[in-house]
Amino acid sequence: MPLKTLKQETANALTLEWILHVKNYKLTLNKGYCVGCQICTLACPKEAIKLVKHPKIQGEKAKKAKVDIDLAKCNFCGICDILCPYGAIKISVNGEHLLSVVEKESFPQLVRDIQVDASKFPAGDMKCEESCPLNLIYITRLTPDGNIVKNLKSIPRKDRKKLQVKIDVEKERCPCCRVCEFKCPEGVMHIRKFIHGKIFIHTNKCPEGCTDCLDVCPITGALYYSDEDKKVHPDEMFCIYCGACKVVCPVEEALELKRTKIIHTPVSSGAWNKALEKLASPIEISKELKAKGSQKAFSSVEKRLGWKSA
Amino acid sequence: MATEKIKVEEPRIGVFVCHCGLNIAGVLDIKELLDYSKTLPNVVFVKDNRYTCADPGQEEIRKAIKEHKLNRVIVAACSPRMHEPTFRRTVSDVDLNPFLFEMANIREFSSWCHSSTPKEATEKAKDLIKMAVAKSRLLQPLQTIEVPVTNKALVIGGGIAGMNAALDLAEMGFKVYLLEKGESIGGHMAQLDKTFPTLDCSICIEGPKMVDVGRHPNIKIIANADLINVSGFIGNFKVKIRKNPRYVIAENCTGCGECKEICPIEYPNEWDMNLGVRKAISVPFDQAVPLVYTINKDYCIECFKCVDACGARQAINFEQQHEEIEIDVGAIVVATGYDIYMPYDNSLLGYGKYTNVITSLEFERLILAAGPTGGKVVRASDGQKPHSIAFIQCVGSRDKNKYPYCSNFCCMYTLKHVVQLKEKYKQDVEVYVFYMDMRSNFKGYEEFYDRARESSVNFIRGRVSQILEVPETKNLLIHTEDMTLGQPIEIEAEMVVLATAAIPKKGTDEIARILNVTRGADGFFMESHPKLKPIDAPTDGVFFAGACQGLKDIPYSVSQGSGAASRAATVLSKPKWKIEPIVSVIDATKCRNVNSKCGICAERCPYGSIKVEEKKAAEVITAMCHGCGTCVAECPADAITQMHFTGAQIFAQIRAALETNPEEKILAFLCNWCSYAGADLAGTSRFEYPPTIRPIRVMCSGRVDRDFVLEALRLGAGMVLIGACHLPYDCHYISGNWKMKARMDALAPMLNKLGLSPERFRVEYVSAAEGVKFAEVVREMTAQLKALGKDKIKAENEKLRPVLENMLKRKEKK
C-alpha cells in the first residue's frame, strides 16, 4: 500500500513526515537557522536534498539559497541533522529527537570542541556575549547571594568582581568559527574548528563591487570587502568552510573552497566515507582511512599481546 | 476443379450405412441410401449394419478394408463427436491411416430431427453422404505429432495455491521450480492472523508448509525474481527469469539476523501494510522462506555495519547484480494471486483522509499478536483502543462503477474479525457490521455466521453512503440506510474497517502477455472451459491455481493447487506428448512475407504459434498450433492450409451439397465445439426442424473463409449460415469467433450492395446447450427462404454470379 506521507512548508520551517500507524518520523528544517550552505546537500546519502537558488535582483543583496528535500527520496536517516554546522535540521521519531545512526554507531558525530573558562571572564565585559555572529552565547551573572543580575549597569563597578559568571553556549548550533575566541577576553573561550579547509578568491575573476558571497556569509569576519580593490577577501581565521558563499557566487571558479578535514567521533562507517568523499575529496578519505588503518592495526596488536590501553 | 497435389493412389471408398437399430432405419430408407452411395465416384463398396459401432459392425469394416483394398472409409451414422474416435481406431487396426476415415452424420442431423418427413430426410442423408464422399476423396494420411516432454515444472507464485501445487508435483517425483516475485514465499496467507471458520492461526498452519517447500529436494525456490519470457510449447517451455539482487549471498546467509540488529535504518514494511517498519537489511517477517536477508538499497545508507556484523560468513555483497537464468520445463502452473484494492479514489469513505479509517488487511496486521502493535487494536490518531468499531462490507466489490464481481471472502473474514474482537475485548467494544448480503456458503461457514450473530454484534443491512470525521475526536460518522427499518441512520464509531475488493495482482497483464493467456472482463485469468477445464489455460501445458483465476479462500485455493499439480502431471508423466495433426501448414512459396511485410497470420493467431521474421516465409510452430484454422482464412495469399480441413476438401463439400436444387438449401458452416454440438443436441432432443440445412463441420468458425461463402452463393445456395460460439469468451480457440465476426461484418454489407437479400447470409451464435435455438434458427431461415421464393433467389443469383465468379477467379486457377 502507498505510504501516508506529509510535506509541509511554512515561512519558518519545512517539515517532512512518514505517518505510520504506530510510528511517526519527522524531519524539521528550521529556515531561520539554515544558511543555504552545501553541507547537507553534499552529504545526503540518498541525494534527497537540493538547493534552490534565488534569482539575483539588481541592486538588492544576494539571498541565501533555499533547501528543498524530496520526500520520495528521504529515508529519515539523520545524517543531515548530524552534519549541519548550524543545527538547522532535526529528525524526530514519535516526537523525540532520535538519531539511530548515532546510536548504532554507523555514523560519527561532529566534534564541537568548545571550552569555556568562566573563571577568566571579567564580569564587567559586555563584548563577549555580542561577539557571536549567531547569538549563541548566553552569559549569566549571579550575585554572591545567588540572584541573577538583570541589569549589569545597576551594579557598581567595584562590586562587579564579586559576581559569579556562568557562560552557556548553544553548542548544537555552533559552527565553531572562533570569532568569540578572539573577541572575548583572553582565555575565556577556546574553540577548535571541526571543518578545516582552504578558501581562496581569485581576484582576477571576482567581479568588482560584487558582494554576493559576503551577503550570505553567516560568520561576521570570515569575508570582508576591501575598498582598495573593491573585491571580497576571505579570512581563513574565521571561515568554517560551509560553502554558503560558493553557492551564490555568480562567477564560476572565482571562489575556490576546499574542505580537507572534518573532526568527528571515532566511528568507522561506509556512509561516513562516502559523505567525506563528497564533502572533501577522495584524497582526504584515503588519508583518513590510512590513519584509521594504522589505528586498527595498533588495536589488534594491543589485543593480541593483551595490553590494556591506559 | 481443385485437386490435391499429393495423390497417393486412386481412392477406393467404402461406405457403411448404419441402421442404429431403428434410430436411423426407422426413418430413412437405408436401401435407397446404399443404392445411391454406389453411384458416387470412387465408391467401390457399400454395406449396411445394424449397429456399426458394435464389435461385429467394426469387424465388417476391417474385413472390407482388407478384402476390397479400401483406402477410404465412410460411416454414415451418428455424429462424429460421438464415434469418430471409435472408428478411427477401427481402421487403424488394419493399418489404414485414421485420417482417411470420414463420417456422415445422418442420425443427429437427419433421422432424429426430420422424423415426420422421411422422404426429405432421406434426400438430406444422401446429400450428407455425398458431401462425405467428396471430402473423403481428398483426404490425406496424417501422422499424429509427438513432442518430447521435459518432466520438470514451473510454478509461478509462492502463495498457498502455488506452494501446494509445487509440493504435490514434487511428491510425485517431478522437479519443480517455484518462482516468487517477493522476498519470501507464503503469499497473503502469511499476513493473516487467524483463519475462518476454525480460528486457527494462519502462520502456524502455513509456516510448516513453507518449511516443507523450502526443504523439499525436488523444489527449487527462485525468490525475489521476475518472469521475463516464456517461449516454446507444451512439454518444452523455455523460461527466462531475472533474479533481482538481494545484496546478500543466499548460500552464505544463515538467517541469524545479527545484521538486522546493527542496522540503523528503518523503512515502512509493506508486508505489514506499512503500519510498522523494517530494517534496511531484513526479512519481511520472521518465518520467511527462504530465510535470506535482503538489503533495500532505496533506503540503505551503506554504512557497512552489516558487513562487520556478518563477519566471517561474508554473506553481504553490495556489488550483486541482476542475474538472468533460463530453465526448461514441460508444464507451467500460474498461481499469481491477488492484490487488495486501496480505496483512495472513493472520497465518500474517507480512506487516506481520515486517520481512523483502515482496510481489513490493515486490521488483520493490527490484531495479529506478531504485528506492529503486538496484537493491540489501536487508533492511529491517538494510539488508544477504540470502543466502537464499524466494519463496512463490499467496498469496491459488487459495485457497478468499480468492481462488479463479489470478492468472495470478505464476508467471512469480517465475521472472523468481529468474533475475534468480541472474544478479545468482550463488552468493552461495540461492533457494527454494515453489509448488503452476508455470503457464507461453504462448509462450516454458516455455522460461523451464527456464532458471530450470537456474539452481540450489530448487523445492519444497508450500503454505506458516506463517512464523515468528527474533527475534535477523530471519530467517524457513518451514514447509511437501514434496509430493515427502511430509514436513514447515522452511527458514530471510533474506528472504521473497510472490507475492500480483491483485484488481480499487479503485473497480471504482463504475465498474461508472456504466457499468451487471456483475461476476463474482471481482469482475472480465463480458464479454458468454465465447467470442464476450470484449471487449464487455453495455452496447452499452462494451468491455473488459486485466486489468479478468480477469487478464492484458502481451502479452495489449496484444492485448486493440488488440482493444477495433477493436471500438470498428466503432461509431465508422459515421455512424449501427442498432438492432433489438424494443424496449419504454410506454403513458403506462396507466403507474401518473403517479398513484402505481411505477418497477418501471426497477428491473428490466437495462440501466437506463428513465427514471422522479415523477408522470410511465416512458420507455424506445430506443437503450439491448436488447429482452429483462423490463419488459413485470414491469409491474403491463400498460402496456409489446415490439415484435414483443407480448402479443397471444404470446397468439395460445398459443391457436393449444392449440386442439386441449391436454391432450396441452407448451407451451414458449424464450429465443432458450440454450434455443431448445438445442432447435435437438437437431434438428440428430437427437435424437429425443416430438412433444408446442409451443415459442414469446421473446428472453429474462424476457419470460415469468405471464399466459402462466395462459392456457396455462386453455386446458387438459397442461404448461407455460419454458426459460432457465443461472444465474447465462449470460443474454444480464444478468439476465432471474433476473427470470423470481423471478416463477415465486412463481407455482409458488400453482398447486400451487390443485390443479396440480407436474410440470405446469416451469422448465428449457438452454444452446445442451445439445441432449441439451433432448431429455431433453421425454422426461421427456412420460412424466410420460402417467403423470398425460388424465383427471387434465382434472379438474385443470376445477378450475383458474374461478380462472384470474378471474385473467385484466383481460386479457380488453383
Image (cartoon, rainbow, N blue to C red):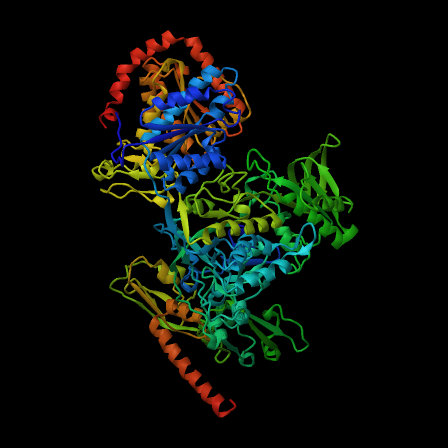
- Whole-percent x, y for residue B231 in the image: 37, 50
- Whole-percent x, y for residue A224 in the image: 36, 66
Q: Is residue B615 left or right of residue A146?
A: left
Q: Nearer the viewer, residue B104 or B512?
A: B104
- Whole-percent x, y for residue B354 in the image: 62, 45
Identify the residue shown where x is 68% and y is 56%.
B200
Farthest-out residue, left: B595
Residue B624 visible within the image: yes
The quadrant of the image that shows the C terminus of chain B is top left
Q: Is residue A142 left or right of residue B20?
A: right
- Whole-percent x, y for residue B224 in the image: 47, 58
Q: Nearer the viewer, residue B589 or B14?
A: B14
Q: Is residue A46 above or below residue B772?
A: below
Q: Nearer the viewer, residue A285 or B539?
A: B539
Quarter of the rendering containing residue B480: top right
Quarter of the rendering containing residue B517: top left
Identify the residue shown where x is 36% and y is 58%.
A248
Count the marks: 0
Farthest-out residue, front: B67
The quadrant of the image that shows the N terminus of chain B is top left
Q: Nearer the viewer, residue B487 or A175?
A: B487
Residue B383 visible within the image: no
